């Protein structure tokens, strides 16, 4: 999730270290999630499209605001992005279930749990 990386790089404020580390954790988890999804795509016989251009083309997430640096603004923006991503992943779980692809639905369930955990951690900073 490139939104977390953007927040991680540009964050300023008194909770910088705590949020910087949290955003780092989210970036790492997003990388693991992308790897799981890409490997599953290939296992199912398709090609994983891993370029930035392909990701941008297919993304349903709103563009991350580039001009923010305040902690609260990043927390709100990242919270919104994580919530939207989680909603999309839950939709993917339902779609895979309808198709009878329990293994992929299970993979998306794992990603959903991780996303919800990170959303909870980020939202805790909203007060």
Image (cartoon, grey):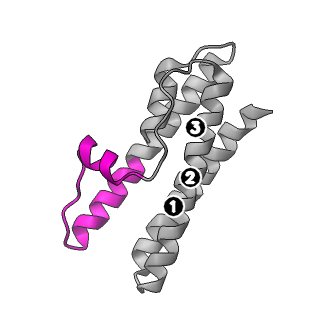
Q: Does the magenta stretch include residue 21?
A: no
* Sequence-first tag of 1 and 3: 3
Q: In this view, does 102 lie above or below 87?
A: below
Which residue, given by chain and number where applicable, does mark 1 sit on?
A: 88
Q: What stretch is highlighted in magenta?
A: 32-59
Q: Which residue shows up at 61% across the image and 44% down it?
A: 80
Q: What element carries label 1?
A: helix
Residue 46: assigned label: none
Q: Is mark 3 on a helix, strand or loop?
A: helix
**Quarter of the image where one finds residue 120:** top right
Quick check: 96 left or right of 125?
left
Q: Is the N terminus in the top left, top right, bottom left or bottom right quadrant? A: top left
Which residue, given by chain and number where applicable, does mark 2 sit on?
A: 84
Disc 3 and disc 2: Cα gap in Å? Answer: 10 Å
Q: Is residue 77 above or below residue 66?
A: below
Residue 78: assigned label: 3
Q: Are marks 3 and 2 in contact (CB under 8 Å)?
A: no
Q: Is mark 2 on a helix, strand or loop?
A: helix
**Residue 6: percent from left, percent from top:** 46, 28
- Callout 2: few (<14), some (14-19), or many (20+) C-alpha neighbours within 10 Å? some
């Amino acid at each position: 999730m490139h939104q977390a990386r953007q927040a991680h790089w540009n964050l300023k404020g008194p909770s910088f270290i705590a949020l910087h580390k949290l955003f780092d954790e989210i970036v790492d988890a997003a990388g693991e999630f992308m790897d799981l999804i890409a490997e599953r795509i290939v296992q199912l016989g398709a090609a994983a499209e891993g370029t930035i251009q392909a990701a941008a083309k297919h993304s349903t997430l709103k563009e991350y605001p580039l001009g923010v640096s305040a902690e609260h603004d990043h927390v709100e923006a990242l919270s919104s992005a994580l919530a939207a991503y989680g909603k999309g992943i839950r939709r993917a779980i339902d779609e895979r279930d309808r198709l009878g692809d329990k293994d992929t639905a299970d993979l998306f369930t794992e990603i959903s749990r991780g996303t919800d955990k990170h959303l909870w951690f980020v939202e805790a900073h909203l007060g």
